[in-house]
């Protein structure tokens, strides 16, 4: 699951760079705005990636510690 999020995030960054390049070439503000929004969503997905990684690690640790009591 986390690998899929990371791959999707890399694809968003690549798409954002493509939009920014097209905006620079054609001098269109709307493409620059779209590229910025895609870059912001990629950053948000990266935050989710790290939060989920920490959460899965926490759940694994809790599962191991609770099984040691029984």
Image: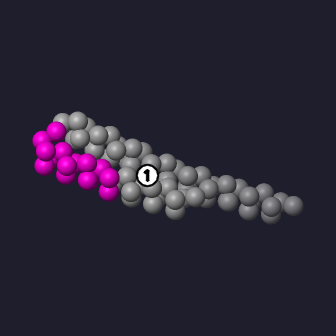
Q: Is residue 57 magenta?
A: no
Q: Residue 21 location, x and y as percent?
A: 19, 51
Residue 19 x, y percent position in the rendering = 25, 48
- For residue 12, side relative to residue 24 (left or right): right
Q: Where is residue 38 in the image (x, y as percent from the top left)?
A: 34, 44
- Disc 1 crowd rating (10 Å Cα; few below 14, some 14-19, many 20+) is some
Extreme residue in the right direction: 70
Total tally of numbered discs in the picture: 1
Residue stretch rendered in magenta on the structure? 14-28
Given residues 47 and 8, the one toward you in this image is 8
Report the quarter where the C terminus lies.
bottom right
Q: Which residue is drawn at 50% across and 55% down?
A: 5
Q: Where is residue 27 in the image (x, y as percent from the top left)?
A: 12, 41
Q: Is residue 33 left or right of residue 44?
A: left
Residue under the image location 42 percent in, 54 percent down? 9
**Element type at marker 1?**
helix
Please, what is the dominant secondary structure of the magenta stretch? helix
Q: Mark 1 points at which residue?
A: 46
The quadrant where residue 58 appears: bottom right
Residue 29 sits in which quadrant?
Answer: top left
**Residue at point 16% right, 39% down?**
28
Report the coloring of the rendering: one colour
Picture quarter with the N terminus? bottom right
Per the image, is 20 magenta?
yes
């Amino acid at each position: 699951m986390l690998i899929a999020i990371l791959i999707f995030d890399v694809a968003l960054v690549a798409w954002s760079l493509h939009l920014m390049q097209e905006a620079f070439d054609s001098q269109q503000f709307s493409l620059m705005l779209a590229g910025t929004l895609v870059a912001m969503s990629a950053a948000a997905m990266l935050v989710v990636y790290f939060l989920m990684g920490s959460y899965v690690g926490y759940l694994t640790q809790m599962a191991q510690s609770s099984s040691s009591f029984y």
